[in-house]
Amino acid sequence: MHQQVYHSSEIQAWEGRWFAQQNSAYGLMQQVAWATTEQMLPRLKQQQVNSVAVCCGQGNNAGDGYLIASYLAVQGYDVEIYAAALGESTSLQQAHAAAVQQGIMIHTGFAFQHSYDAYIDALFGIGLNSELSSDWQAVIRQINRQTGLKIAVDIPSGLQANTGQALPCAVVADYTFTALGLKAGLFTGQGKAFAGEVTLISLLPVDSALKPLASLAPQYVHLVPRQAFGHKGSYGHVLVIGGHAQMGGAVMLAAEAAFHAGAGKVTVVCDAKHHTAILSRAPNIMLRDINQMSLQEC
């Protein structure tokens, strides 16, 4: 089954439509935090985690962090929170109050008092679009230097949610639990190097206005069996164009990949200098000389 991948603006608009129906923002935060905790618990048990440091920023991603800390404390984990100054979001303040009520130690700042078995990153969410300040860069590098398990809530802090670009650094997570929909930046650019194992926390009903950006192919792609009476023209024709006389490798690899992906016919339009090499590797590829063709023929 193909999983849908979304631009961050689609996720934010989806949340907006949900709240416009008089659904509670704090209620959704509680659901996300509890579902994330449920998915997290088997990993913590497997890694024999006892002590946990939860790092909270100033937005709603931090609210998830405060609630996750509360839920983990109820489960018997030794939890401490390291936090920035509390932001103005009502949901965030409610989540902070829940952690205080649970009796969790909350440290101001990110100077870890000792080492922990796991570090939960709830600093920044999908709204981050500009380069981190030097202070925040220092915090992220401090987290990355720790030897314990690293877990990101929604997205590794410092990673741009759509491009996968580090701004300019990001938390290197072992696990990322991303809420509502898969974000493109977890799979593009530098994203895969920071996200670790990605788990989707799916909660809201998908509405008709939600538009995916792309789909993730399954790990193993199974091609449709070909009919006994079919021929190469029955399974699509791929045109690969590359013109540089000194760079034939790209068209060669792209053409072979097209065949492996199931194309029936593949035509390469390139400099004739590369024709012999291409045919020696894949004689089923059809060739045209780019220098002998008009734009209309291409």
Image (cartoon, rainbow, N blue to C red):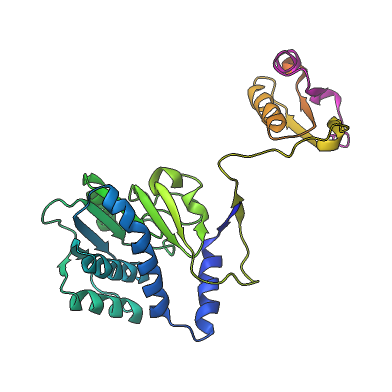
Choose top left, top right, bottom left or bottom right for residue 177.
bottom left
Residue at 74% x, 13% y is 276
Q: Residue at x 45, y 49 (%)?
A: 165
Residue 132 appears in the rendering:
no
Q: Is residue 279 magenta?
A: yes
Residue 267 drawn above or below residue 167: above
Question: Can the viewer see residue 131?
Answer: yes
144 to 128, vertically: above or below = above
In the image: residue 217, left or right of residue 41: right
Outermost residue on the left side: it is 113
Picture coordinates of residue 124 (x, y %)? 35, 62
Q: Is residue 175 left or right of residue 110?
A: right
Q: In which image quadrant can residue 54 be found?
A: bottom left
Which residue: 58% across, 39% down?
220
Where, by quadrant of the figure, is residue 251 drawn? top right
- Expressed as whole percent of the image width and height from the top left, the position of residue 203 reads 48, 69
Q: Quadrant of the C terminus?
A: top right
Please tell me which residue lies in front, 258 or 135: 258
Q: Position of residue 186 (x, y in %)?
A: 47, 51
Q: Position of residue 18 (x, y in %)?
A: 52, 78
Residue 141 belongs to magenta span = no
Vertical comparison of 191 with 89: above or below: above
Look at 15% across and 57% down and name the residue there. Answer: 111
Please provide the residue range marked out in magenta: 275-298
Who is closer to the viewer here, 7 or 236?
A: 236
Please state if 105 lies on the left or on the right of 89 as rendered.
Answer: left
Q: How many marks?
A: 0
